[in-house]
Image: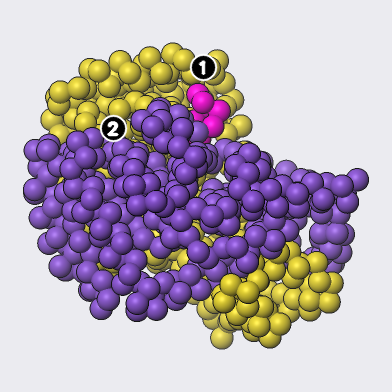
Chain colours: A yellow, B purple
Amino acid sequence: MARNEETGIMELVENMLCGAEQSLSRLITLVEMDAPDVPQIMKTILPRTGRAYSIGITGPPGSGKSTLVDRLTAIARCKGLSVGIIAVDPTSPFSGGAVLGDRIRMQQHYLDEGVFIRSMATRGCLGGLPRAARAVIKLLDAFGKDLIIVETVGVGQTELDIMKMVDTTVVVLFPGGGDAIQTMKAGLMEIANIFVVNKADRPGADQLVMELEAMLSLNPKNSYWQVPVLATQAVNNVGIEELYREIERHRSVLESTGQLSQQRQTQRRAELIQAIEQEVSERLSSLMEKDENLIALCEQVEKGERDPYSAARDILSNRAMLRGWFARMESEGKGENKKK
Amino acid sequence: MARNEETGIMELVENMLCGAEQSLSRLITLVEMDAPDVPQIMKTILPRTGRAYSIGITGPPGSGKSTLVDRLTAIARCKGLSVGIIAVDPTSPFSGGAVLGDRIRMQQHYLDEGVFIRSMATRGCLGGLPRAARAVIKLLDAFGKDLIIVETVGVGQTELDIMKMVDTTVVVLFPGGGDAIQTMKAGLMEIANIFVVNKADRPGADQLVMELEAMLSLNPKNSYWQVPVLATQAVNNVGIEELYREIERHRSVLESTGQLSQQRQTQRRAELIQAIEQEVSERLSSLMEKDENLIALCEQVEKGERDPYSAARDILSNRAMLRGWFARMESEGKGENKKK
């Protein structure tokens, strides 16, 4: 039975690597569900990854990121590149998943076989959104997409984490959506490789560009790249060619200075640490529901009779408990297909 | 030595519980640093917590949250309540910590002994921002603050997580800062107990209120609370009294229906699980730097020769390696003062 399942997964991977979009979709769903086969899938596709270039597009809601992604995709397609798009939407209770509103604008690309679009939502991702997003980037890479664009909806810590996984990060702002100080406060200055002031036909655009440039001039520059600030009107297709060129320029700087491989090494290291932590957490969580001592302790904490911090530490200082856990953790790990 | 340190910490806690603000500040810093004494601190203050009421204020950058917090604080002070304010700012490279820009508006309260204001930034929080924020809420509670207001700057997953810790969540929007669909997409519909359309003198405010109300009417209502949408102009002090009254009304509904204690139980359970995971992760991370097998494996992953997912699983399926880890983890746990 387990044997058959595994064969099924490997067939799926093989079909995906041969270009079957349906298999790709199914694999993405497995990644979102944090299925037990994910490590096996990732191991198999590894030799086929590392070729794609990834771009992150982030910024506050309403800055026009989706339209921008749409326009950039059109340019990439004209140049003959295949494109994978990941739209990261925190879950809404209304849709039971990702919202399709903005995606409608992308419909010109839905019919284009060279473009693959996928929305991902927090709710659907059992192992956490950044982890899942990272795996999906790899799947798209292995699938053979030349360019992968990751677009986030919110601007918060998770979104910043996701941006750490891409090669070039574009931060999109718009006049009236908060000034440069707000941008700085949201942590966006740190991650931007390129700033875009979209909706540049609105009043205040020039000022926002100037503010950003002023702030960037205060920023201790790194030696190989000076962050440009571009004005665009995605809806009117103004400034998009320039943006595309700047992305290409950033890429070639990263490549020629060796920064790209450096950046990717750092990403992989972070991935390993996170993967181990995740794995341990999952096994612990499942034990939390079975171990009687723990259940009793949990009740005390819930009632406010014990504080969670010292309870956690006590648990992990208890030699007998740790030993017992560890024994169970091993057996949990063995019955992998039963996990979750 | 360790004995003396512990005595020092307990003295700090005692002074804090007697009302010394300086001791409170120092304890908050310890929490941010994720100092080894944090569990002990939390254990000690536990009996003094649970009395304060907490309010979360979140929304996109530029919505005027700080001014709103300022105004709500003024009302609470008029009613004789003491107030603790936590401003959660993702770190910026410019300030090396939280940004004080907005805080300047709060200066009227800086001279008020009944108000304690603290900014917290991601960079400063070794154990993660939500965890630290939660501990600071407890410290302020134990310190005797009647009302604790947590304000976030961004709108992302971390910010949503932080909002899960408070009793009442207020989501602040403004005309021109993204429409109701964007709000929904950012996951804010799910967490809002009260919606505020601030800067309501701007064009588009009425429409935004209507959109929100329309969306809320689609939302499967819970039986005890219907989310209101309020229009405010924080700068002009318009609508703030109403907002304060709605917060009070929400509180009394939560209390009379038993929801408040229910909510807090759920929060405490989540806290325990997170505390355990955190503790394990920290111990594992420190082992990652010492274990030779792991260092070698890490290098392979960095070079892209192995994928992180299956590497993580292999490590945790390796009986000998796990045993060794746990033995070390135990001894790590013992030398707590040396941790980190």
Q: Disc 2 residue type?
A: Gly
First along the sequence among labels 2 and 1: 2
Residue range of the region highlighted in magenta in the rendering: B88-97
Residue at 69 percent of width and 56 percent of height: B41
Residue depth check, mark 2 versus mark 1: number of the one nearer the observer: 2
Element type at marker 1? loop
Identify the residue under disc 1: A221
Q: Which residue lies furthest to the right in this view?
A: B1
Identify the residue under disc 2: A178
Residue at 19 percent of width and 47 percent of height: B239
Element type at marker 2? loop
In the rendered structure, the answer to whether residue A273 lies left or right of residue B186 reads right
Q: Looking at the picture, how far across and down is residue B90, in whole percent?
A: 47, 39
Residue A257 falls in which quadrant of the image?
top right
Q: Looking at the picture, how far across and down is residue B338, in whole percent?
A: 83, 47
Residue at 31 percent of width and 62 percent of height: B248
Q: Disc 1 residue type?
A: Lys
Q: Nearer the viewer, residue B186 or B109?
A: B109
